[in-house]
Image (tube, rainbow, N blue to C red):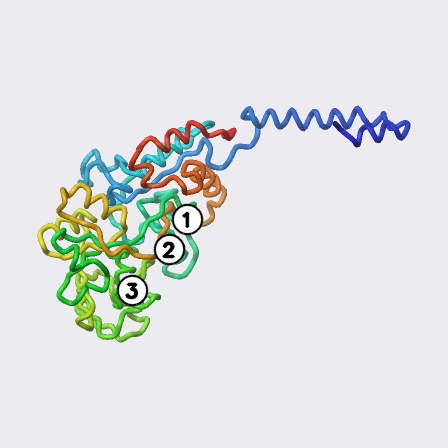
Amino acid sequence: MYPFNSAVGKAGGGFRWAWPVKMLLLSVALLGLAACAGGGERPACAGDSFNVGFYAYFAPMSYSANEDPASDGFNSHLGYEADLLTALEVMEGPGTTFTRRAIAEWDGIWLKSAGPDFDMVGGGITALDSRTMDASGNRVVSFTSGHVSFRQSLLVRADDEVELAGYGDLTSDRRVGVLAGTTGEARLLQLTGLADADGVLAAGTRLETAQGMVTADGSSDYTIAASGESANLEGRRMLYPPTDAMPQVVYLGDVLGETELLEALASGEIDALARGEIGNRDAASVSGGKFVVTALDESAEVGGFTLAADDLERATCIDRRINWLTDNRSIGYAEWLADSQVFMRRAESWGDDY
């Protein structure tokens, strides 16, 4: 078993070293057993407590039991990400706990884990490198492993399914609702030609903002990206296209997020809602045939949680557990929708020491 010890013995006189070597090996083995039993240094997130912020209005990914911020149920977390976090809490070993608090405003939500109030933030947030940096370009947060994949899409009234089958069908007589600062908005602008790949708005695009009407000149001074926008475009309410081949964009959701957009679609205030496929398919499913999903984006996105950029050890620890629960992303939204206990069962079969 120990070739080195055997060689020493055959060399003559070397047996005086065999016993100390065996004792050393035994000591190492005992230390290993102690670590497995809980005596060793445990992973950074095991037995730790996290203050988690979650977006309150993104059903079915992440949402509050009650939409009213003044209600008792506002901080009760529901949805796909809620069940994923609960499964993380029950994984074998010293438990990780998540104290959850709802966040009503979407704008820059991913950066809140860099502040004093939250250790981790989620809510169906697309993981983008540009979203890890603050306005000064400093990297202040990092994303965990992606736990869900999805694509952007349009939600339209059933009567418009054929006429609005793709982004190219969105002309200036059509109004598309978006939540500002989302990848739904950013991809809509890119796919309809209202913005280039960097988010620079097409020359002649007019926007109604809190500061008044502004007109893009084709320069980077008028930019809307998933990670933020030019200061002169903050508080935007309407976007008017420079040509008839592009749609109008209506900005809603400041108060009740996606709920306002769905109500606007139902009332006819907007003709389409541009956002992730998961939320749109859920809305179509519960609409009783009133809404349908069209115009699936060819590009896929990955959603994750954010932690402070210098919280690397705990992020790595959380990553390992998320990867286990999702079986390296082979278990995702579709599997959870079919069986909401899928993550809990994975948690119960977690074989790590912590």
**Tag 1 secondary structure:** strand
Please name whichever residue, 170 or 88, is drawn nearer the observer in this view of the structure: 170
The residues tagged by marks 2 and 1 sit, at their Cα atoms, a distance apart of 9 Å
Judge whether 341 appears above or below 248 on screen.
above
Q: Is residue 210 visible?
A: no
Residue under the point 10% across and 56% down: 269
Q: Earlier in the sequence, mark 3 or mark 1?
A: 1
Residue bearing mark 1 = 143
Q: Find disc 2 in the rendering and name its residue.
A: 131
Tell me which label, 2 or 1, sits earlier in the chain: 2
Using the image, determine if residue 213 lies above or below residue 106.
Answer: below
Dots 2 and 1: beta carbons under 8 Å? Answer: yes
**For the residues carrying marks 2 and 3, which lies nearer the camera in this image?**
3
Q: Position of residue 15 (x, y in %)?
A: 85, 25
Residue 250: image quadrant is bottom left
Q: Which element type, helix, strand or loop, lies under badge 3?
A: helix
Q: Position of residue 145 (x, y in %)?
A: 43, 45
Give how far apart the Cα atoms at labels 3 and 1 are: 24 Å
Percent of width and height locating residue 343 = 37, 33
Q: Quadrant of the N terminus?
A: top right
Q: Earlier in the sequence, mark 2 or mark 3?
A: 2
Q: 92 or 168: which is nearer to us?
A: 168
Point out the residue furthest to the left here.
267
Outermost residue toward the front in this view = 162
Is residue 157 depicted above or below 2 in this figure?
below
Distance between the Cα atoms at labels 2 and 3? Answer: 18 Å
| Residue under label 3 | 190
Instruction: Pick out the residue farthest to the right.
Output: 12
Give the amino acid type for the residue marked by disc 3 in the picture.
Gln
